[in-house]
Amino acid sequence: MSGTVERFDEKARREVGGWGRTVVHRGELLRHPVYTRFLHWSVALFFVLSLLTGFAIYSPWLYRWLAPLFGGGPLTRFLHPWFGLLFDVAFFFQFLNWFAPMRWTASDRRWMRRIKAYTTNEEKVEAEDVGIFNGGQKLYFWAIAVSAVLFLITGLLLWFDDIVARWLVAACYVTHDIAALVMLAGFIVHVYEGTAAQPGTFRSMVDGTVARAWAWTHHPAWYREVTGRDPREDYERESRRLVERERAVRVWEREQDARELTGEAGPRELP
Ligand code: HEM
């Protein structure tokens, strides 16, 4: 990223940072500052609004359900390009904000080769070289970037279709709709990955933080970078601690059963 963009992004982080608060408790790490969260949810809002209004225009069946939500057909048709433009504007700033960490590296190529193991949950802990974002997340980011440009070009041509050749209008429809369907598929996977598939991820976009255990599990190289600690060692120490705790609880339960059988006094504190 050039110096100018970096300086702009820093300034925006500082200014928008004042609009909210991020509290990092013990055992947590800062993942997404206020500015990043603000941009992400602006992108998400305008994306969903563009998608809903777009689907209303696209399919007569969906039109019946979706157009009334936006005040009827003509208003839906009017709003769609504006929502699309606002999506592009929000994503432009998100692009500047994430351009540096989203650079494609050798580690991402290796991640792509392991994608089957990732989707089938074969490995509980990610490979040591996975940084702040994994290959799949970067791929999604770049797919959005390409789609945003395609939406903008084809969308503007469709908006002013009376000054554009018919064949170009037809080509724009096809490109616009394919980009929307690809984005819809990516969006479904993204929401699943950011919520149900990986517990502890969603809060990073709400309060800005993640648990340390989440970081060494899913992004070990980033964990090493921000804490200066060895993710594998911390993971193994925590696994040993959990095993020991479980063993201590089992011993306590056996002793408690024995005490109850011999009529000894009530429950004692857990170890
Ligand atoms: C509305 C439902 C959505 C939810 C629940 C959601 C959730 C999240 C979460 C939790 C993260 C942080 C992941 C991490 O730190 O590892 C994230 C990142 C991201 N989100 Fe969303 N998001 C949503 C919508 C969207 C939309 C509509 C877009 C763009 C069209 C988008 C684009 C991104 C991108 C590019 C990232 C960074 C890379 C990645 O994690 O895939 N999100 N999202």
Image (cartoon, rainbow, N blue to C red):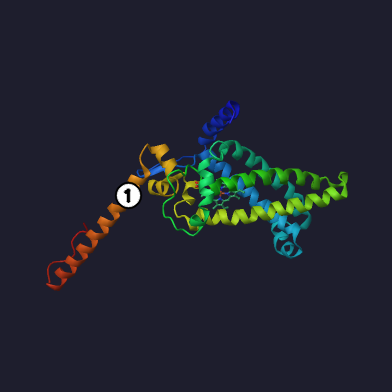
Q: Position of residue 118 (x, y in %)?
A: 49, 55
Q: Position of residue 203 (x, y in %)?
A: 47, 49
Q: Which residue is drawn at 73% across and 43% down?
A: 152
For the N terminus, which image quadrant?
top right
Q: Which residue lies furthest to the top in this view?
A: 3
Please say whether residue 228 is visible from this viewpoint: yes
Residue 77 left/right relative to 254: right
- Depth check: give the residue in front, 63 or 143: 143
The kind of residue tagged 1 is: Glu
Secondary structure under tag 1 reads helix
Q: Is residue 196 above or below residue 216?
A: below
- The residue identified by callout 1 is 236
103 sits to left or right of 268: right
Instruction: Tell me the crowding category of disc 1: few under 14, some 14 to 19, or many 20 or more residues within 10 angstroms, Cα based.
Output: few
Q: Say which quadrant the C terminus sits in.
A: bottom left
Which is more toward the observer, 55 or 213?
Answer: 213
Q: Where is residue 99 in the image (x, y as percent from the top left)?
A: 58, 37
In the figure, 68 relative to 84: above or below? below
* Residue 251 higher or lower than 14, as above or below: below
Q: Quadrant of residue 68?
A: bottom right
Residue 196, how many percent across, how many down? 49, 58
Residue 23 seen in the current view:
no
Q: Which residue is drawn at 56% across and 29% down?
A: 6
Nearest the camera: 90 or 241? Answer: 241
Question: Which residue is found at the position 63% from the left and 42% from the top?
Answer: 91
